[in-house]
Amino acid sequence: MSDQITLKSHRFRAEREDSWKELETILKAIEGRGMKSLTDAQIVALPRLYRSTLSSLSVARATSLDQAVIMYLESLSARAYYVLYGSQIGLGKRISTFFLRDWPLAAKELWRETAVSAGLTLLAAILAYILVTNNPDWFYTFVPESLASGRTPVASAETLRETLYHDGDSSGLGLFASYLFSHNSKVAMFCFALGFAFCIPTAILLLYNGFMLGSFIAVFAEKNLGFEVGGWLIIHGATEIFAIILAGAAGLHIGKAVAFPGELSRTESASRAGGTASLLMAGVVIMLFFAGLLEGFGRQLITNDWLRYGIGLGTLSIWLLYFYAPRPIEGDN
């Protein structure tokens, strides 16, 4: 089966590679010496070659050809799009394009990596929950004392409940939100940046994050506060944990490109994979900022369990629709 796919990919490339090389030659000339370096024939051919490359990319995706071919065509199409339309797009248009097209398409393209990232987090959370429930000492293995803040297996139910609803000093909420944004951003950035090491550090970070999550839930559930801690977590966790999962997906995408570069060198393969992953990470930072506000302000000021669940599930639904709802793709028509 693998040999058939390889043969099919080689035939596909042989039939269309001349037009790709012609487009790449034109793009290199523009990137090196500007549009003035092109001949009249090259200027006329550029839009046609761009459309032809987009068509090839659509066919390659639909027929599940060699990933290296798909990544090459994605890179070539992106370069051509920038040359044709980039200089005509203002700052406002660039921002709207990012939010309306580039970010959600990057998330949708990495749905497999996102599923693996979410699966690792969920698996670790379930395992930690079982371990801590059966032996509370496991909690101290998974959760640093600095993050526990008194929420440990030896705490009483009253103490744990107070941590879920205590408003605290409202003047300090801004500092609290800033701290959480900084901490969660570091976790997400490490998940992304360490992906190049064949996905291993990224997978370990996702597992560790899941271990901490499951351990916290187990401590509260043991004191019959499972429903309450769910609301405490979901109001911000629907955005925060989803953002870290997406960061993990970006890291796994790069790691996969390094581990399985196909016909490219590992450096070239990682560079091409980095385009989509970087788009996704730019959006992850925005999600983490929003999660920091929800955690630092909303969770501290909103103490009704049902309202917490409503906000958390509502934001999760919005993110899922934003990323995965069908939408027209500009340039594919």
Image (cartoon, rainbow, N blue to C red):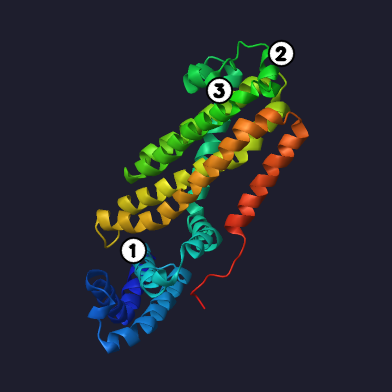
According to the picture, the residue beneath numbered tag 3 turns out to be 131
Residue 140: x percent and y percent?
Answer: 50, 17
Q: Earlier in the sequence, mark 1 or mark 2?
A: 1
Q: Nearer the viewer, mark 1 or mark 2?
A: 2
* Disc 1 residue crowd, few under 14, some 14–19, many 20+, Cα 10 Å: many
* Disc 2 residue crowd, few under 14, some 14–19, many 20+, Cα 10 Å: few
Horizontal side of 200 relative to 58 (left or right) equals left
- Check residue 158 in the rendering and tell me which mark sits there, or answer none: 2
Q: Is residue 305 above or below residue 191?
A: above
Horizontal side of 283 relative to 81 (left or right) equals right
Q: Is residue 135 above or below residue 111?
A: above
Residue drawn at x 59%, y 37% as measured from the top left: 293
Label 3 near label 2: C-beta < 8 Å? no
Rounded to the nearest angstrom, the CA distance separating label 1 from label 3 is 42 Å
> Could you tell me which quadrant the N terminus lies in?
bottom left
Q: Residue lying furthest bottom in this view?
A: 41
Label 2 near label 1: C-beta < 8 Å? no
Residue 300: x percent and y percent?
Answer: 66, 28
Label 2's element? helix
Label 1's element? helix
According to the picture, the residue beneath numbered tag 1 turns out to be 68
Q: Nearer the viewer, mark 1 or mark 3?
A: 1
Tag 2: residue type?
A: Glu
Label 3's element? helix
Q: Earlier in the sequence, mark 2 or mark 3?
A: 3
Rounded to the nearest angstrom, the CA distance separating label 1 from label 2 is 57 Å
Q: In front: 66, or 248?
A: 248
* Disc 3 residue crowd, few under 14, some 14–19, many 20+, Cα 10 Å: some
Rounded to the nearest angstrom, the CA distance separating label 2 from label 3 is 23 Å
Residue drawn at x 55%, y 27% as measured from the top left: 176
Horizontal side of 28 relative to 249 (left or right) equals left
Tag 3: residue type?
A: Leu
